Amino acid sequence: MSTFEDFKKQFKGDIVTPHDPTYQQALDRWAANARRDAAVVAFVKDAEDVALAIKHARTTGLRIAVRGGGHSPAGTSSSEGGLVIDLSRYLNNVRVDSDKKLIHVQGGAQWGSVDHAAIKHGLAGVAGTVNHTGVGGLAVGGGYGWLSGQHGLVIDNTVQLTVVTADGSILTASETENSDLFFGVRGGGSNFGVVTEFVFKLHPQRAKVFAGPVLFGPDKCEKLAAFLDEWWPRAKAEEGILVAMMRGPDGNPLIMSFVFYNGFEEEGRKAYKGLFDLGPIVDQAAEVPYEELNNMTNPLAEWGANYYFKGLPLAPKPSDDLNPKMYDQILRFASSPDHVCAVLLEYLPHGKINSISADSAPYRRDLAGNTLILIQWKDNTPEKSLAAKEMAHSIAKLLPQGEGYGNYTPESDALPTAGAVTADKTKALFREHYPKLQAIKKKYDPDMIFNQWYTVIPA
């Protein structure tokens, strides 16, 4: 019996190959340009299936990718000619333990499921800002959300993980069990194994929050920056603003601010009075059910378009990023009629995040916040793809330099060919934690079979 037949016989989930009618559907990704023609897509039903898929890939020399939500524009959940371990079809359930204020989330779930399940109990966890983002990728790379000001990152609210490692072992990782693996996975990305279940802390959460887009014309750029300069140093934990420099659907310059306040509308309008007093051209901020909050930025993250991301650190002072001169330069680069370009400045208070011990997880605790250059386009061609990359890198040169948030990584940084790793980028991301991660990598994945994201080279 062939190795593949043996694999199929033992495997409980679905195995899809290029000969199957559902093959193209199995390759579907949030970013259409992140699709790759895998040799095998293994829709796993449990951790044992994951172990079997790893064993088969290693036996046959197939490169492994892991798909949770399929939301990486860098293509980290796809593998050309390789094997994709896909958690999304069967391992997508969530279970709330309201007494312990914990939520058990399978590795293929999306954040929308977490938001909806938890709020039924008057609870919420730190989640992403787009509800169809996969839990897995966000949660192992750091994890920012609207509640980060109050509760820290997703990795700071992770209490237990079930991880299938390179040798097929199914391990529980926590502060008290396999604590080195627990350290590595919370911020070290997909370097150490496949997470089939997360257990996150939940926190009491009010049913409604004040949030929504507030749009300004370019003439308000300087005044908006002055408001942010005054607000940002004293921003409270329950606040947060996302600012996007972009062109509107009609091609005209636009500054979108998306405001969030974890409280009543009256309190939110008071907290952001200086912003509303500027006279927005559109004000759609309102009290909304908490579980709807992460739907609201979905228009910038439409499923099935093509995407290119570039992440950078936020400047300490908002007016260093947002000013008329910078805005004009950005718009000059972002003038292609084929591309939608937004420079997103994320003002999520970092007091709680940066108060957590630097040794708790391999994640920096000195950032002010993140900038994301997001390029979206339809009908992918090599020319459009190259233009998007050039646009992002030209804009990036205008902004503060440094290694940005790992989950905002462009493909060229994230996807080494197996064994040939952009080591300098990885060291710059993990900094003083890199030697410890190398030791963990040597223990759990010495052959570097997990190599789809800022790959750590074993010590």
Image (tube, rainbow, N blue to C red):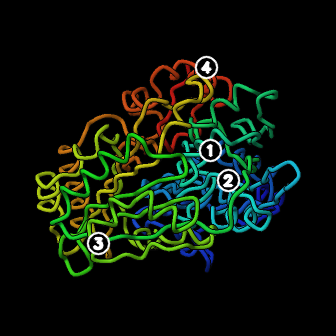
Q: Specify the quadrant that holds the C terminus.
A: top right
Tell me how far mark 4 sits from mark 2, CA to CA: 31 Å
Q: Is residue 156 above or below residue 32?
A: above
Mark 3 vs mark 4: give the one in front.
Answer: 3
Question: What is the tally of numbered marks visible in this picture?
Answer: 4
Q: Specify the quadrant that holds the N terminus.
A: bottom right
Mark 1 vs mark 3: give the one in front.
Answer: 3
Mark 3 vs mark 2: give the one in front.
Answer: 3
139, 294: nearer the viewer: 294
424, 104: nearer the viewer: 104
Q: Secondary structure at mark 3?
A: loop
Q: For mark 4, what is the residue? A: 439
Q: For mark 3, what is the residue? A: 280
Amino acid at the residue labelled 3: Pro
Q: Residue at x 74, y 46 (%)?
A: 201
100, 265: nearer the viewer: 265
Tell me how far mark 3 sits from mark 4, CA to CA: 53 Å
Amino acid at the residue labelled 1: His
Asked which quadrant contains residue 184, the reply is: top right
Q: Mark 4 or 1 closer to N-term?
A: 1
